[in-house]
């Protein structure tokens, strides 16, 4: 019922009458009144005016399943949502749920991660109460080779959502989202598969939202929604927007199981495009101009001798000529 009440209050511009709430939720006026009291105790500011009804004036920034659902209009992604105050890592949690049989499209979120994981064994810091950390559990019906491309689909989705919220967001290949050339989002994809069969994929995303300061050593490389706009955002609302956008892009992706239909949208907001990049792998380093991604998600880099190299994500790291981007 909390999801439904919040949804109705959020969809309305002004007051919603007690009678309308009773009719739509099929409960008594007393039940509505009790619910409103409970919401107020949880920190929601609800104005109640005689002959007008109720209006949601302010909501706390909570990471709760009901809060996310109240913003959400998806078809299958997030039909099951779990949220916890604190977990080690949402990816680890999603893998556990997957092993227990949780369905395709399950979403898990946490307010805090005590052992958040980054790529290449790095740690992902996720202090309580400020940022977003969530993981999608997917059971795709495609070959394991296609799974790494989901990370690019997620990067694209997050960048598009950041733009919808007014940020000048770009993608740093393969899947970091950057604003002002600083990272605002990281994505970690993990998979359980047999040689020709995907058991499940967990797609974990961390987005810096209301973080007001960045540790000194990362200051020139990381940012947040707050630092870019000076405003605080509802984390649940942004999570819901990412769920909807990813669902839309995923449905396009699985029609071909490659990025052929998303490639143009991706390349349009690829920060490296037409920029000089340094490609580093274990054995050597070269520079060139990034051209865009292929339908397989590889980065095309034209080298100084006019050759075009296809760079596979995971094998190398790509840096801007003068720094991170
Ligand atoms: C990176 O850029 O190194 C990837 C960072 C991925 C962080 C997210 S936060 C939610 C999910 N749970 C984790 O433990 N990691 C991912």
Image: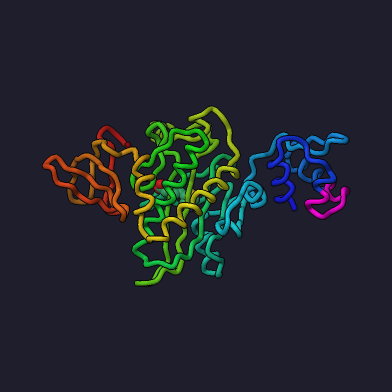
Residue under the point 26% across and 50% down: 316
Residue under the point 84% across and 43% down: 18
Q: Position of residue 36 (x, y in %)?
A: 80, 44
Q: Which residue range is magenta in the image? A: 22-34
Q: Position of residue 206 (x, y in %)?
A: 48, 46
Q: Position of residue 233 (x, y in %)?
A: 58, 36
Quarter holding residue 219: top left
Residue under the point 24% across and 47% down: 300
Residue most toward the top? 230
* Residue 28 belongs to magenta span: yes
Depth check: 191 or 305 in front?
305
Question: Is residue 142 shown above or below 10?
Answer: below
Depth check: 256 or 85 in front?
256
* Residue 239 belongs to magenta span: no
Residue most toward the left? 305
Question: Is residue 243 shown above or below 227?
Answer: below
Magenta part mainly helix, strand or loop?
helix
Depth check: 81 or 264 in front?
264
């Amino acid at each position: 019922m909390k999801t439904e009440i919040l949804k109705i209050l959020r969809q309305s511009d002004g007051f919603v009458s007690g009678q309308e709430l009773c009719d739509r939720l099929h409960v008594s006026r007393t039940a509505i009144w009790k619910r409103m009291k409970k919401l107020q105790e949880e920190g929601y500011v609800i104005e109640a005016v005689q002959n007008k009804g109720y209006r949601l004036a302010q909501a706390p920034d909570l990471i709760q399943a009901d809060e996310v659902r109240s913003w959400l209009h998806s078809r299958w992604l997030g039909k099951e949502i779990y949220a916890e105050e604190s977990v080690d890592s949402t990816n680890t949690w999603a893998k556990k749920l997957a092993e227990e049989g949780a369905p395709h499209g399950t979403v898990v979120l946490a307010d805090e991660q005590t052992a958040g994981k980054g790529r290449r064994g790095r740690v992902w810091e996720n202090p309580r109460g400020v940022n977003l950390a969530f993981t999608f559990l997917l059971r795709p019906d495609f070959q394991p080779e296609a799974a790494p491309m989901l990370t690019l689909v997620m990067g694209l989705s997050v960048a598009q959502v950041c733009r919808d919220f007014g940020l000048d967001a770009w993608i740093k290949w393969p899947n970091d989202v950057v604003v002002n050339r600083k990272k605002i989002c990281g994505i970690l994809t993990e998979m359980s598969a047999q040689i020709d069969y995907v058991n499940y994929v967990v797609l974990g995303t961390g987005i810096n939202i209301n973080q007001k300061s960045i540790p000194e050593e990362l200051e020139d490389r990381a940012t947040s929604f707050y630092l870019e706009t000076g405003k605080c955002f509802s984390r649940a609302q942004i999570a819901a927007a990412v769920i909807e956008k990813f669902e839309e892009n995923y449905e396009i992706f699985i029609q071909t199981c490659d990025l052929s239909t998303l490639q143009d949208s991706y390349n349009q907001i690829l920060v490296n495009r037409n920029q000089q990049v340094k490609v580093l792998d274990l054995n050597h380093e070269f520079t060139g101009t990034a051209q865009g991604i292929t339908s397989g998600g590889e980065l095309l880099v034209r080298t100084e001798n006019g050759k075009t190299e296809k760079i596979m994500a995971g094998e190398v790291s790509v840096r801007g000529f003068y720094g991170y981007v």
